[in-house]
Amino acid sequence: MDYQTILEKVSKAVAPLTGEGKVADYIPALANVNPNKYAVCIDSIDGNLYAVGDADERFSLQSITKVFSLAMCLSIKGEELWTRVGKEPSGTAFNSLVQLEVEGMPRNPFINAGAIVLADVLLTSFPDPEARFLSFVRELCGSDTVDYNLEVAHSEREAGYLNAAIVNLLKYHKKIERDVEEVLAFYFKMCSIEMNCKELARAFLAFANHSRFDYAGVSLTLSQVKRINAVMQTCGFYDEAGEFSYLVGLPGKSGVGGGIAAVYPRRYSVAVWSPRLNSKGNSVMGMKTLELLTTETMESIF
Ligand code: GLN
């Protein structure tokens, strides 16, 4: 398949959408990002890289990092992890408190409440969780300059009233062990990791379920990787998971930095970045790019 030509065609086709949507400005440091940036990159298991646009420019991964925390927590806890967090789609916004109040446990690891529980699992599992998480992520993407962005993490803490409410509700329900401020700080720090589309595609190639998953001491069976894909498919886009599944047909994960990473199992991973978001917090051009990619190629999991 000539992916380079397809990506060029798709990126031209989505260009008229430039200007639609809104950059995530509830995190003050993200409000300054150039909204017109755009990149898409495919990394294939047979060793080819295809890229269009600003694919060397790093951006804030935000909720995409929840896939990395899930991988780490699953490798530590195995199936027992699911006693701390559910694996059902929420059908609500990523930062919603509603179900947590009624059910007392986060629906899944990809909404904020669930990822905050994962942060607590990591904090209680390692003496040096920040360093551990970073070395895992660096090994996944093959770059040792990938890092946390402390300015973004601090800026999010300053405006992070809703996430502070979530962590307090979790503490009330005895769902986290550590101190609320410590958990929140680590959660925001994980969200602040930056990568470019080439690095992000490389990081997700590990989830394309094609070979041994063993990175910086984090090892998963192929069955566990398959299940992470299942959670991405059902929960990766919050209350738009059904729409993404319908339009794109690949397991994936979005972030409010405007990135989306997805995998075509055993074939390739794809990363796309465009900062303007729709009302659900997913990249407008990113979603359209992936929809057109799987339409053009006729390749999806369905
Ligand atoms: N750090 C962001 C938050 O907690 C992540 C949200 C996202 O990317 N959907 O609100």
Image (cartoon, rainbow, N blue to C red):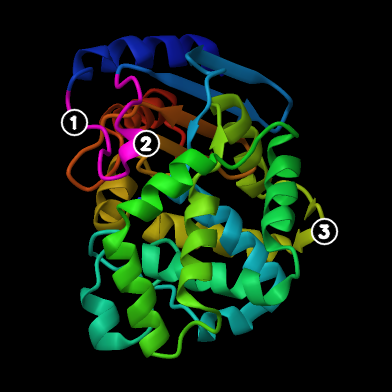
Tell me the kind of residue under disc 2.
Ala
Q: As rendered, which of 89 and 117 lies closer to the eye? A: 117
Query: Could you tell me which secondary element the residue under label 3 belongs to?
Result: loop
Q: Where are the magenta residues, as a range?
A: 20-35
Question: Cα distance, mark 3 to mark 2?
Answer: 33 Å
Quadrant in the picture for residue 198? top right
Query: Is 288 on the left-hand or right-hand side of 179?
Result: left
| Residue holding disc 1 | 21
Q: Which residue is mark 3?
A: 217
Q: Is the distance from the Cβ of mark 1 to the nearest ligand 1 atom less than 8 Å? A: no
| Residue 30 forms part of the magenta stretch | yes
Q: Is residue 121 shown above or below 301?
A: below
Is residue 254 something that shows in the picture? no
- Under circle 2, the secondary element is helix
Find out if the beta carbon at label 2 lies less than 8 Å from the nearest ligand 1 atom: no
Q: Residues within 10 Å of mark 1 (few under 14, many from 20)?
A: some
Residue type at mark 3: give it: Gly
Q: Position of residue 16 (x, y in %)?
A: 20, 13
Q: Which circle marks residue 29 in the picture?
A: 2
- Residue at horizontal 59 percent and vertical 33 percent from the top: 201
Bin the neighbour count of mark 2 within 10 Å (Cα to Cα): few under 14, some 14-19, many 20 and up. Answer: some
Query: SS for tag 1?
Result: loop
Left or right of 120? Residue 116 is left
User: Pointer 3 and pointer 2: residues touching (CB < 8 Å)?
Assistant: no
Can residue 264 be found in the magenta stretch? no
| Residue 66, percent from left and from top | 51, 56
Say whether marks 2 and 1 touch (CB < 8 Å).
Answer: no
* 51 in relation to 249, above or below: above
